[in-house]
Image (tube, grey):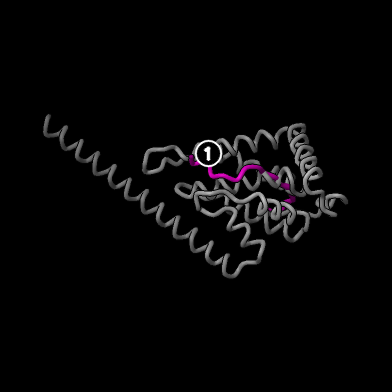
Amino acid sequence: LLVCSSRRRTLSARVKMSSDWVKSFSDIAGYAKNAAQQASTMMAGSELERKLAEATSNEPWGASSTMLQEISRATFAYDDFKTVMLFVWRSAQNQGALWRVTYKTLNMLDYILRHGSERVIEDAKDHLREIKKLQKFEYVDPDGKDQGVNVREKARQLVEMLTSEEALNAERDKARATRNKYGGVSAAEMSGGGGGGGGAGKGGKGGAGGGAGSGDGSE
């Protein structure tokens, strides 16, 4: 019995070790793929695509408010809106060790929901199911810290805002008042540019967006 018990413990330890190796390899592969994609975008992408890649990089710092403002303003131009939203839904699919990329993407979405074209709102509502799935995001880093909580909490906040018209309108009114106070509004915003015109992302659906916050929440 003692021998069998010892063998079971040894087998269990080997299985755990094997699982850890698989997870580690998966993380490294994910890092490498993300780094290659970002390098390609920074080299060959448009100026907007480079800003999007920088704003959602895997680095442990958040996007600047200036960069988020520029991305937000881009959503008032239809072609740029499609570029932004396609990037958002692709980038939000990152898993595991790339939790920062997903978290910073959700932060960017939060910002453009508040400050961007109304198309962003429509598009985000069309992708509400994907955002809800991120409320179950899991990742525990090698030090045993639950980093997935950052993604889960931001996803929860976005779902809450997107399912409450009153809350969303209040946040957009607040953002508009801040812009009026400190920097004015663009011609596109003044004319209501950003309504209608189709959409981006899955199934060619329309949308609008927002977001707030730029840190990675890892502290």
- The kind of residue on which mark 1 rests is Asn
Please provide percent x and percent y for residue 98.
48, 50
Query: Is the N terminus in the top left, top right, bottom left or bottom right quadrant?
Result: top left
| Residue positioned 68% across, 59% down in the render | 83
Q: How many numbered dots are placed on residues in this image? A: 1
Q: Which residue is mark 1?
A: 150
Seen as rendered, the residue at the extreme front is 182
Q: Is residue 150 placed above or below 195 in the rendered structure? A: above
Q: Is 79 left, or right, of 216 in this rendering?
A: right
Please provide percent x and percent y for residue 164.
73, 32
| Residue positioned 86% across, 50% down in the render | 190
Q: Secondary structure at mark 1?
A: helix
Please provide percent x and percent y for residue 32.
44, 60
Q: Is 195 left, or right, of 38 in this rendering?
A: right
Q: Is 28 left, or right, of 133 in this rendering?
A: left
* Residue 131 magenta: no
Which one is in front, 182 or 89? 182
| Residue positioned 32% across, 50% down in the render | 21
Q: Which residues are magenta?
A: 201-219
| Residue positioned 64% across, 48% down in the render | 108
Task: Give the dominant element type of the magenta stretch: helix, strand or loop.
Answer: loop
